[in-house]
Amino acid sequence: MRRRRLLLVLAAGTFATAARAQYRGVAPGQVLRGNFMQERRIKGFDRPLISTGDFVLAPGQGLIWRTEKPFAIVTVITAKGLVQEVGGTETTRLATARLPFLGRLYDLLGAALSGDWHKLGSQFQVTQQGDATQWELTLVPHAGADPVAMPFRSITLRGGTFLDEVRIVRLDDDSDHLVFSGQTLGTGEPSAAEAALLREAGK
Amino acid sequence: MSRTMAAAWLVVVVLLGVHLAWRVERGLTFGTDLMALLPRDEADPALQRVNDQVAQSLSRRVAILVGDRDRDRARQAATIMTRDLAGSSLVEITALPSGPKRFAALGALYFPYRSGLLSEDDRQRLLDGHAETLETRALSQVFGLIGMADVRLLRRDPFMLLPAFFAALTLPSSRLGIDDGMLSVTDAGMTWILISGRLRGDPYALDVQARLNTVFEAATRAIRAGDPDVQVLHAGAVFFAAAGAKSAMADMSTLGVASSLGTVALILLVFRALTPLVLTVLAIGVGMGAGLSVSLLLFGELHIMAMLLGLSLIGIAVDYSLYYCVEMFAPGQRTPNQRLVRVMPGITLGLITTTVGYATFLLAPFPGLRQVAAFSVVGLIASFATVVFWLPLLDRRGPVRHGRVLLAATALLWRFWEAPALRPVRIAVLVVLAGIGLAGAGRISALDDVRRMQSLSPDLVAEQARLQQIAGFTIGTQFFVVRAADTETALRREETLLDRLRPLRLAGALGGYRAPASFVPSAQRQRQNRTLRQVRLETPLLAGYLAQIGLPAVELDTAPDGVLTLAAAEKIEPLDEILGELTVADGDQVAHIVMLDNVSRADAVRSAATGIDGVNFVDPAADFSRLLGRYRRRVVALLMVSAVLMLPLLALRYRLAGAIRVMLPAVLTIVLVPMAKALLGDPFTFFDAMALVLVLSVAVDYAVFCAEADAAYKPVALLGVWMAMASTVLSFGLLERSQVAAVHAVGSTMLLGVVLAFLLAPMAGRRKQREDG
């Protein structure tokens, strides 16, 4: 069960609220919805790659990440792995079983989620700033970490009640900047269409 | 005269003894490869050579999976196991590409030729006219939640087709992935790590097996000491061979000891004297020693199974001295020479018929059974010679007087077969036997599947199944051999084959395949791919795609005309090892192997090679099973031939009617035994057929002794037969307990056979009483 919840956080800690006292989390039976803007900067490209869309997070079931612009991509993440679809056609499928790295990332982010600094500390140097209403957490891999398994320079999470912003800097200085908005924590199940997506990805 | 012969025989025995002692001094070794007992396919020796090399390579594989709920502890355990196995210098651990450097070598090899490399699926998409799916996939990777592109790659391979080619290179059915330098998989909360390697020694050498098991068990203990929750699974032919050899050795020592002790006890109980025991032990000892000595002289090395079956010779070799010793129960005072004269016709006919039976083993081209035959024939002749030349000289016993109860008991069996009043009972018994025969005939079924006869250790089978289920691959035994005059032709033939296997894989007929052409396509295929990519993908779609992602410039081909060659790939780690397994040196010919995983529909897979030159499907277990079936039928024919051959031999002494009467109980026995076994649920195998050849010899032997006896000697003769039967039950019958299915089949057939032959033997007796009355 814990494992499944950790999975949900793969999308760079969509709801990771690091300050232990403040963390409200998403409980089973609750569904978190919101919008995102992702800005990817790759050296040598004319302009940043910007995509926008919305997401649905259902603890114990998975995460649906729907990119609407510049074109529709649906990414579904479950305990079994990651599946990407374009126009109803599956383009990518990554199995957790074959990519233990994915599973380990969940563990780390899960540690961040539950405030288990000790566990995070085994892979990252963790710096915490701000207060309960406006906090910032910076994760830096230890010196000497395997660059194949840990291709990040740093990961920064910022938020208050919810996670508002994630910044990932890769070793080659390419970066991703994710900004979340309009987040609502509701009760009830995902819609039938969403449930079907999660089922398909969980195969 | 008899003293001269005795002295001459002593010289022979001493010479054989010296040879045996010299061999034992040098250290006796036994073969343990069960397949070595089976016949060779001589139709295509070149193919057989390739098969042997592949089989040898497969049999050297060792796979160990260590698992723990905690990743770090699993990795720690894997590190210990790897260190200990590698440190033993018994196993060469398969190195993984670890760290960026290793991938760099692989990348540097493939990257310049990327325009000619397409994964099977991508090539099919382009052929089907679905180029846009490749564009869509690239876009979703560039824009997707997890960025999978960097600009250096995108500039040179904008649709990221080389990563797709690499992703398809790993075993399609494998669940394993590389995690920080180790092959890992997570399954039900456990992290499993695969350690695979190649045995440096011969997996069928007993000392290699023993050393590997010691190292493996010590490493497992060391791991468990630090982490009691860790799980260790192991698989590989060497572990199966070790378990098989261990159980055969255990069989040999326990059954050998039980059989020897039983025979000693039997003789002491019956004769209540030491002389018969000493004489019998002498006859057996000379027989066994001579059999072993001559077999080693002929074959150089004995197989452990031949040894095991050969040792059962005790059961038959003992007969001659028993028949002789039982003469001590005969009424009246007799000299040793008179005793010998009495049994001489019986044991001579017995030796001849038994030798005819064993000689049929020599006709079957099974190397191990030839060893059994040679061991047995030599041993029997030596025992016979010992009885004939030595026993009368060594025998100082007067007649034995305590045999009344035993003789009365055997007289009862005679009475059953001869008393006119019991005729209805005899008919009833024969009707029951006929009923068993008919019921069994309705149930009898042949079994030739060598996989079911090898009786692999069930624990190991379960462990291997679990390992394969977790790791998601099978240690395949089926493969194609692709032969051609040169590498390019071989690669093209493979591609034709792979193109046919792909739909079969998608339909589930097999799980996956690996061929040299999967790693390095033929030059022809690389050029086709290049054209396909330019015409179907880059010309129509590249400009629009680049505009959409905002990438200003690309640098396409660096080697527009070059092709990647197998020779270049074979120099790069880890391809050197992978390709080394898939290519076999075969004179000036090229032989490539297409390894298959999880074959579920062998016939469909086999027929994929139809019409492609130089391609053969090899399914060693099925091929061996077919051969076993062929030879099972041949042995049944040999059985009939030897029965027919015995008839004129016996007719020389008993005339035709008498010969038929002697053969009748033996023939009834060999017909009824497989039927009775069928009723018990046992299938009829090649090994049952082989055992029936022995049963026939022994049964004729018993009948001859009964036929030789005149009225006064009948109980004595039958006591001899009873002792012969009891000692055979003690040796062969104990094989019925063996874990080795083939040995079990021989044992159970012999057990039933000799008991039935004993019970029916008096049928062959001369009908004096009736004739007189």
Image (cartoon, grey):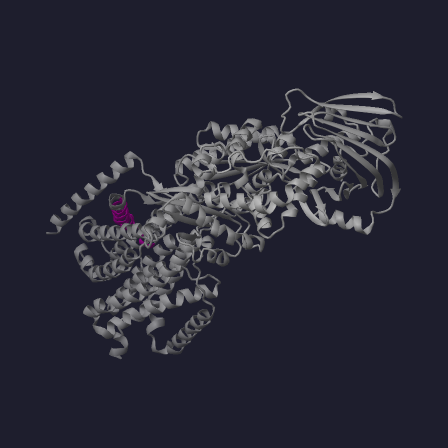
Relative to B689, residue B37 above or below: above
Q: Nearer the viewer, residue B372 or B503?
A: B503
Residue B286 painted magenta: yes
Magenta-colored segment: predominant secondary structure: helix
Q: Is residue B631 left or right of residue B244?
A: left
Q: Is residue B216 left or right of residue B538?
A: left
In the rendered image, the residue lying farthest to the bottom is B773
Q: Write the residue at 42% across / 34% down.
A: B200
| The C terminus of chain B sits in image quarter | bottom left
- Residue B639 placed where, x, y %? 31, 64
The quadrant in which residue B22 appears is top left
Regarding residue A175, the answer to whether it shows in the image is yes
Q: Nearer the viewer, residue B216 or B491?
A: B491
- Residue B443 placed where, x, y %? 47, 68
Relative to A166, residue B176 above or below: below
Regarding residue B254, the answer to whether it shows in the image is no
Give the magenta range: B270-292
Relative to B727, residue B73 above or below: above
Q: Nearer the viewer, residue B47 or B118?
A: B118
Q: Nearer the viewer, residue B441 or A146?
A: A146
Residue B383 painted magenta: no
- Residue B356 placed where, x, y %? 25, 60
